[in-house]
Image: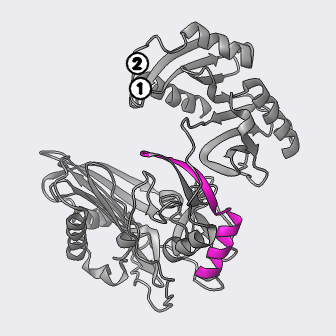
């Protein structure tokens, strides 16, 4: 498995899936200088083969990527060197070697610190160790240092190091630094005003979701924070997206739990032929069956399904349908067709088209669809069109893995859609914390405070939590931050 991961990583490097062009220029360090830097800081790396690539990104950043592979006991070491500064900014180590140690976290931290002393990034003195950060996995300990200036953390400027618990070897290192003058902190709104804005527009919302642990999925009741997607501009008090653009959000009200509102689930076991008849209704005569499968753990859940896949005979099109073998219900549909990449319609027009499509094609589940989700969460997709999510509700609570997604292309056509309705048991919404209590605990535990953040328009001060992505899910019963996988 590790060899496969290394191969995939090497493939990405060699084929240039990144948005780059590989043309050296005189302002960067040479290949020999990059090799010398790696040897000086990391010592001799034993290898049977090497591959060295230069990459220059369209944002004018450039790197040398040095990959070394040893075959007897498989090892792959990949080092990324900033071609302008000569700093090692990425390090990944994969090995088939199985250690027998049982490191304590304190010992692993010393190993991480020793590695940091060897790599020695130029601005190391501006980073502080985060003792509260613990992102340990089954095999590794994870450590984080955060850039902090003027008493303010710089969001996403971090140093991350992972240490294998059994071998004591560093397996992963990243160093991120943002160039540019820091903005003044004069005239920023205070924490009380920012907290008020968060509680009004950004407080966590109660939802169902699937949490994965070692590829096994469990449905959990959680509060989800929109903070990975939105922050508060500390100058203006505007809610802004990740690009720094102001957005208008509706106030997320606490969900009114309705124990009597639950979709009716029929249960009639089906064999392959019966499942095919159910699935084929979505295909039409212009689709050709390409694949049939039986899966006992569909999506990592305790869900047995028959799946069928079609390609469109004339033109671009694909259809995938999954039918629950135990109930005969359609639990998953993915249908896509040709898209027009020229955006000529507004988001409002696209949303109206998406809503009309859902109302026309999913009439039997209309009472359980959350049509307000797209107003509170402005998910625009990409430059080629619009993307909308319509979750299904259970006990009046949205299930963000269950529901309908609709892609609307630039001309207003439905270019693809998905439908998921995993008909499995869900935990009942009892003995859970309310939205206000969750919000207060979340702001405190996740250190909601003033941060520096680099947008596409430059560095600005914002109010947000320390790890917007990693701390976005909160257990509805305990209020603890949980991982999505």
Q: Residue at x 72, y 40 (%)?
A: 127
Answer with the quarter of the image where residue 346 lies: bottom left
Residue 416 in the figure: left or right of residue 112: left
- In the image, residue 444 lies in the stretch drawn in magenta: yes
Find disc 2 in the rendering and name its residue: 22
Q: Give the residue drawn at x 55%, y 31%.
A: 4
> How busy is the neighbourhood of tag 2: few (under 14 within 10 Å), some, or many (20 plus)?
few
Q: Quadrant of the N terminus?
A: top right
Q: Separation of disc 1 and disc 2 at Cα?
A: 9 Å
Check the image and report above or below for 468 versus 198: above
191 vs 259, nearest the viewer: 191
Q: Nearer the viewer, residue 130 or 356?
A: 130
Residue 30 rendering spot, x and y as whole percentages:
54, 10
Q: Nearer the viewer, residue 22 or 397?
A: 22
- Labels 1 and 2 touching (C-beta < 8 A): yes
Give the magenta-colored segment's residue range.
435-457
As drawn, 54 above or below 347: above
- Residue 400 image-quadrant placement: bottom left
Viewed as shown, does residue 335 lie left or right of 225?
Answer: left
Q: Characterize the local packing of mark 1: few (<14), some (14-19) or many (20 or more) Cα atoms within 10 angstroms.
A: some
Foreground disc of the pair 1, 2: 2
Residue 280 lies in the magenta stretch: no
Q: Quadrant of residue 49?
A: top right
Residue 352 numbered tag: none
Q: Which residue is mark 1?
A: 16
Label 2 SS = loop
Whether residue 277 sits left or right of residue 242 in the image: it is left
Q: Position of residue 20 (x, y in %)?
A: 39, 26
Query: Which residue occupies the foreground of this view, 388 or 28?
Result: 28
State whether residue 392 appears in this view. Answer: yes
């Amino acid at each position: 498995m590790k060899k496969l991961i290394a191969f995939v990583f090497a493939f990405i490097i060699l084929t240039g899936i990144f948005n780059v062009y590989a043309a050296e220029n005189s302002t960067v360090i040479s290949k020999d200088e990059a090799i010398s830097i790696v040897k000086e800081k990391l010592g001799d790396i034993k290898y049977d083969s090497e591959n060295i690539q230069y990459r220059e990104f369209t944002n004018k950043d450039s790197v040398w990527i040095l990959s070394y592979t040893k075959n007897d006991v498989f090892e792959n070491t990949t080092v990324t060197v900033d071609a302008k500064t000569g700093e090692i900014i990425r390090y990944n180590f994969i090995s088939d070697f199985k250690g027998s140690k049982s490191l304590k976290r304190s010992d692993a931290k010393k190993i991480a610190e020793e590695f940091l002393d060897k790599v020695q990034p130029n601005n190391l003195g501006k980073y502080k160790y985060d003792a509260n950060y613990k992102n340990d996995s089954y095999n590794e300990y994870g450590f984080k240092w955060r850039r902090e200036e003027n008493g303010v953390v710089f969001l996403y400027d971090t140093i991350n190091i992972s240490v294998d618990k059994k071998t004591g070897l560093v397996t992963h290192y990243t160093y991120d630094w943002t160039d540019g003058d820091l903005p003044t902190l004069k005239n920023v709104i205070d924490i009380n005003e920012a907290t008020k804005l968060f509680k009004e527009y950004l407080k966590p919302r109660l939802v169902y979701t699937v949490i994965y642990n070692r590829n096994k999925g469990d449905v959990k009741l959680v509060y989800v924070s929109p903070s990975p997607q939105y922050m508060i501009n500390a100058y203006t008090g505007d809610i802004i997206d990740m690009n720094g653009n102001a957005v208008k959000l509706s106030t997320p009200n606490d969900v009114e739990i309705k124990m009597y509102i639950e979709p009716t689930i029929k249960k009639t076991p089906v064999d392959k032929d019966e499942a095919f008849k159910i699935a084929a209704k979505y295909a039409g005569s212009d689709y050709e069956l390409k694949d049939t499968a039986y899966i006992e753990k569909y999506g990592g859940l305790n869900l047995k399904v028959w799946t069928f896949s079609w390609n469109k005979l004339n033109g671009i099109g694909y259809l995938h349908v999954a039918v629950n073998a135990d109930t005969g219900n359609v639990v998953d549909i993915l249908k896509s067709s040709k898209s027009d990449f020229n955006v000529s319609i507004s988001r409002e027009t696209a949303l109206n088209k998406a809503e009309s499509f859902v109302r026309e094609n999913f009439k039997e589940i209309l009472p359980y669809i959350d049509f307000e989700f797209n107003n509170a969460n402005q998910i625009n997709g990409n430059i080629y069109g619009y993307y909308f999510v319509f979750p299904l509700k259970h006990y009046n609570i949205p299930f963000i893995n269950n529901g309908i997604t609709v892609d609307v292309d630039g001309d207003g056509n439905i270019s693809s859609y998905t439908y998921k309705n995993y008909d499995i048991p869900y935990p009942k919404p009892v003995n859970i914390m309310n939205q206000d209590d969750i919000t207060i605990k979340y702001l405190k535990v996740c250190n909601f405070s003033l941060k520096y953040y680099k947008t596409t328009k430059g560095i600005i001060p914002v109010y947000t939590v320390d790890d917007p992505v990693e701390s976005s899910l909160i257990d509805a019963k305990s209020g603890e931050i949980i991982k999505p996988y």
